[in-house]
Amino acid sequence: MDAITDYERSSGMSHAAIVAARDNVLAQKTLTVAVLDGTAVPDIGVSPFIRHDDGLYIYTSHLAGHVQAVLAQKQACFMISVDESLTQNIWARHRLKFSAAVTEIPRDANDFHQLCDAFAAAHGNVMGLIREFSDFHMLRIVPDKGVLVLGFAKAFCVENVGFDIVAHLSRG
Amino acid sequence: MDAITDYERSSGMSHAAIVAARDNVLAQKTLTVAVLDGTAVPDIGVSPFIRHDDGLYIYTSHLAGHVQAVLAQKQACFMISVDESLTQNIWARHRLKFSAAVTEIPRDANDFHQLCDAFAAAHGNVMGLIREFSDFHMLRIVPDKGVLVLGFAKAFCVENVGFDIVAHLSRG
């Protein structure tokens, strides 16, 4: 049996319980993106996403201003939140926020159509309509550092594309 | 009977239907805030909110980094999104995003305790625990301009504290 980690001891949650709660957050269908756009407040948007071993992907239109900002900045802050209706304590809605680098998968890349197929499988037949729209961009999101919030005094630092649990934050 | 507005004609939605969908978004319990914090990506957070005639209110701790940034910036971008499980088309999750000015209601202000009571009524007895915590701040959010997204080609410009519908955006 593995030794108890510092973050398990200080948080009172087992590694398995933290990972299960993290993966439940990641089972949501959409993410929120916040990005600098040169004004005094960030821009913000929502997109369906899929997750592969090398990152998360969104397929989104540059007709939305925040997408133009993401294409220009190539980095942004993201958040995935469990639905309110699935939340027991509304003051501690389970969520994962993280900074990430963003790169575009060109429409002529080998994996572009496989990614479109994965979106259609995950998010339904709207993809059949929008996959040919040239204002849409396939973006790979590679997480860097983040925070998983599971309750008061139950926030955890996460790192890397796998959202590895690395430490307990006493308040987050 | 009122004349049909330009935004009703171009969107194909009646004023009453747009307002009903807007108010359904505003019936969510939490909002997301995105704020500049001096780094290359914004910070982001989630808070329960209440709504009064003079704005929205959140009660939130400065132990979260994004709250320190909101207190410093006194402005931010906000979004309220209908739960995924209540969303028919995941590509067009109903949402309201807006920029807003933020002011703090001091703990010794006349209306501070009334606001705390309103939070307790709306969001339950956790408020009894946290209302005395001095790291928490009562913030009034006064919306300026925003966008209400109800579907493809069904986005609307909104303005002011009442989120008045003012125009149709052909794509948003």
Image: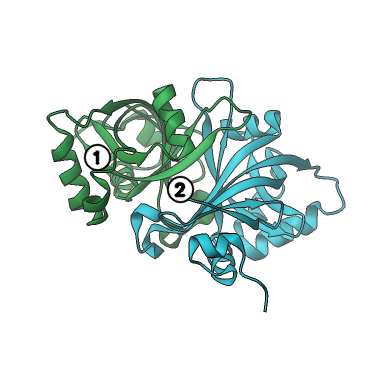
Chain colours: A green, B cyan
Q: Position of residue B82 (x, y in %)?
A: 47, 58
Same chain? Circles 1 and 2:
no
**Is A75 drawn above or below residue A115 in the view shown?**
above
Label 2: chain?
B
Q: Position of residue B37 (x, y in %)?
A: 58, 25
**Is A78 drawn above or below residue A75 in the view shown?**
below
What residue did someone put label 1 on?
A51
Query: Disc 1 to disc 2, how far (Cα)?
Result: 27 Å
Local secondary structure at mark 1: strand
**Is A29 drawn above or below residue B38 in the view shown?**
below
Q: Say which amino acid is labelled 2.
A: Arg
Q: Visible in this render: residue A119?
A: yes
Q: Position of residue A72 (x, y in %)?
A: 43, 23
Q: Visible in this render: residue A160?
A: no
> Of the numbered discs in the image, which one, if any, rests on residue B113?
none
Q: Say which amino acid is labelled 1.
A: Arg
